[in-house]
Image (cartoon, helix red, strand yellow):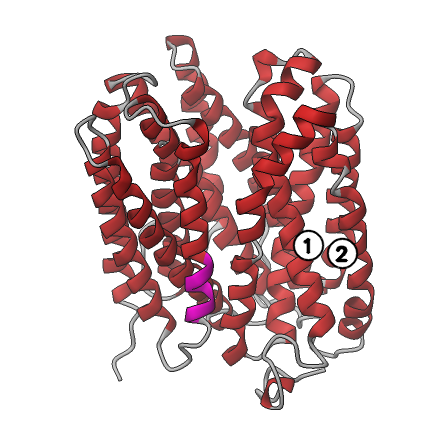
Amino acid sequence: MLDPASGSSGAESGSALWAPDRRVPTLALILLVTLAAFEAMSVGTALPTLVAELGGQDLYSWPFTSFLAASVIGTVLSGRVCDRLGPVPSLIVAPGLFFAGLVVAGVAENMWVLLLGRVLQGAGAGAQIVALYVMVALVYPERDRPAAFGALSAAWVVPSLVGPGLAGLATELLSWRLVFLGLAPLVLIGWLLLIPVVKTLRARPDTVPEQSAEPRKGLPVAAVCAAVGLSALTWAAEHPQLSSLALGIGGLVLLAPSLRRLLPPGTLLGKPGLPVVVLSRGLLSGSFFAVQAYIPLVLANVHGYSPTLAGVPLTVGSLGWSAAAAWQARQRGVQSEVMIRRGFLLLAVALAGAVLIAPAWGPAWLIYPLWAVAGFGMGTAMPNIAVRVLALSTPNDRGFNGAAAQVCDMFGSAALIGLGGVLVGALASAGQPTAAVIPLDLVMAGFALLGAALISRNVRKV
């Protein structure tokens, strides 16, 4: 196995990802992320059918909310385990939780059992991604990590392209249960592929970090409070009534102190160094997904597009993301912060341009090239954020910092998508969303420019 500290690797005589000592870790990484992506891209397609069959119309959004809340807890706990014991325990447990969640959801006879399955899936997915990040730090030297994280991003492409369609066919022709049960055997295979990886990591003296000089207390409690706060805010945003106001305020009260403990000090203020890199993850994901969430709505209800055509920009964005992820892996001479800034600027252009499609008189076709640019910006910046987080981490806090980036991503996306929902409810309607989408797009473009400005302070002078 390679020695990341020395920088030697099988890549000197072969591929950065597929050298003999990296084939199994790379295959396990790509397979597990691909399967998690298939599940994420497919559930929305099957949701109307499964909710109707299980009689859970009043809980329509909770398969997503419960998954996200459990992901927060799984992410934070996995980060803590990785920093204290190394990634091996999480690599063993996390895919098992995800597998169990697929089975439970697939055999559910009521909504509460389905939600239990979604909780297990969320906990497993959150724990798994942090463990895989730490595994990347151990298996790949720093110069090859952009390729590893680029492969992780690219693993979402095929699920984005065919996942919703396959889920729709399975739901219509057979059963929505196949969306869960059909993936379970493949997750089991990915789990088994980790066995030789785990054996190799256990034999490495650097797998388990030394005792941290600054133990972090209260992380499990903070994770639970953050998950509860997120759920409360989500419910309040989806039910904009006076009676939900207290719930939303309670969610904020829980979230504020929890995030301060779950993120590196100074993150919410955008301080230079690691804090601003972690914050950039939330700004990037939040601004992108907040606008993307309303693109199909605008195309369908303002421009009269069919559901299929209204969803095509999302596929175009995924292709742009994949292309950029492959391209950035070859830019070894460029600082990660420079690549992140470029990604933010590309995204800002696309988000501002999306304003043009919001009115009925706007050129709706323009969203296709614009969203390719947006996806390219995401694929340029996102892998470099992961690379830089690892580079700014010690072996004692890779898990915490990797989990912090994931948490910032989750809450940035939830908060800014929720802002879109508030604007639609206050300024427009789902049938005529233009008056809300225009300010939303402009505000999100502003967040992208803010991210570019903040990360610029980390660019080293050469």
| Mark identifier at residue 198 | none
- Please say if 351 is above or below 109: below
Look at the image and tell me in which quarter the C terminus lies. Answer: bottom left
Residue shown at 41% from the left, 53% from the top: 281
Q: Magenta stretch containing residue 40, yes or no?
A: no
Q: Position of residue 58 (x, y in %)?
A: 57, 12
The reply, left or right, for residue 301 in relation to residue 435 is right
Badge 1 amino acid = Leu
Q: Which residue is mark 2?
A: 190
Label 1 near label 2: C-beta < 8 Å? yes
Q: Position of residue 303 (x, y in %)?
A: 28, 26
Badge 2 amino acid = Gly
Q: Residues within 10 Å of mark 2 (few under 14, many from 20)?
A: many
Look at the image and tell me in which quarter the N terminus lies. Answer: bottom right
Q: Which residues are magenta?
A: 322-328
Q: Magenta stretch containing residue 325, yes or no?
A: yes
